[in-house]
Image (cartoon, grey):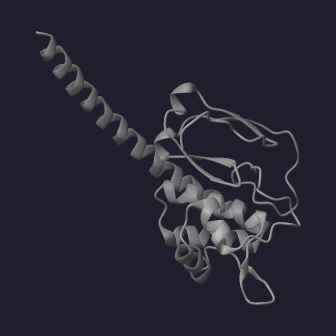
């Protein structure tokens, strides 16, 4: 998607330095743009808390984003979720089958009906996938979230281990980028002579 990039209003505000805005992927449904960052954009983020999280909310999840519909009117079909998230219907069904996705409500005809909280969860799962977290660890994290507040310590440990892996990969990518920069500089200088 090209054009002017706008970020939807969210209750929490995050500031990303200009160098981190370079590679953004966007998906849209009903003209609502959603920002998805890749692992290569990892940087220090300042989040200002403007309201309390709802009781039982996963405090480790991403800040809430604007949804296509308000709560209570959010019975999305699988095709709408596919359009909104970029995931395939097969992937959504697989997430549910392996326990990565909580039980999805059904309509009276048996069709899946996703809620705004399901969309938030899928957004978090997408970010965990970008970190390279193994599916088994993501499923374990989902189980811990469903078990409740008593699992905060284990959730934190799981996310800290993933964070260490991401930082190691970022270091490798920086080294690779330095090699590319040296090669580009060499060829640019050689072309001038």
Q: Residue at x 58, y 73 (%)?
A: 139
Q: Quick one: 90 or 94, which is closer to the camera?
A: 90
The image shows residue 168 at horizontal and vertical percentages of 41, 45
Q: Residue at x 65, y 48 (%)?
A: 34
Left or right: 49 in relation to 161: right
Q: What quarter of the picture does the C terminus occupy?
A: top left
Q: What quarter of the picture does the N terminus occupy?
A: top right
Q: Is residue 73 above or below residue 96?
A: above
Q: Residue at x 36, y 35 (%)?
A: 174
Q: Residue at x 63, y 71 (%)?
A: 79
Q: Quick one: 133 or 40, which is closer to the camera?
A: 40
The image shows residue 49 at horizontal and vertical percentages of 81, 39
Total marks in image: 0
Q: Residue furthest top?
A: 193
The image shows residue 191 at horizontal and vertical percentages of 14, 16
- Asked which quadrant contains residue 17, the reply is top right
Q: Quick one: 126 or 27, which is closer to the camera?
A: 27
Q: Is residue 33 above or below residue 162?
A: above
Left or right: 126 in relation to 179: right
């Amino acid at each position: 998607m090209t054009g002017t990039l706008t970020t939807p209003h969210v209750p929490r505000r995050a500031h990303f330095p200009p160098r981190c805005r370079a590679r953004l992927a966007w998906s849209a449904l009903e003209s609502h743009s959603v920002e998805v960052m890749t692992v290569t954009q990892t940087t220090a983020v300042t989040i200002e808390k403007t309201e309390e999280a709802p009781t039982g909310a996963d405090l480790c999840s991403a800040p809430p984003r604007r949804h296509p519909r308000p709560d209570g009117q959010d019975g999305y079909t699988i095709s709408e979720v596919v359009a909104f998230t970029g995931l395939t219907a097969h992937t959504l069904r697989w997430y549910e089958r392996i326990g990565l996705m909580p039980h999805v409500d059904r309509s009276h005809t048996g069709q899946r009906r996703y809620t705004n909280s399901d969309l938030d969860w899928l957004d978090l799962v997408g970010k965990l996938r970008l970190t390279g977290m193994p599916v088994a660890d993501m499923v374990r994290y989902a189980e811990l979230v469903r078990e409740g507040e008593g699992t905060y310590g284990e959730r934190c440990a799981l996310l800290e281990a993933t964070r260490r892996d991401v930082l190691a990969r970022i270091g490798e990518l920086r080294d690779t980028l330095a090699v590319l920069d040296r090669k580009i500089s060499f060829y640019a200088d050689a072309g001038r002579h």
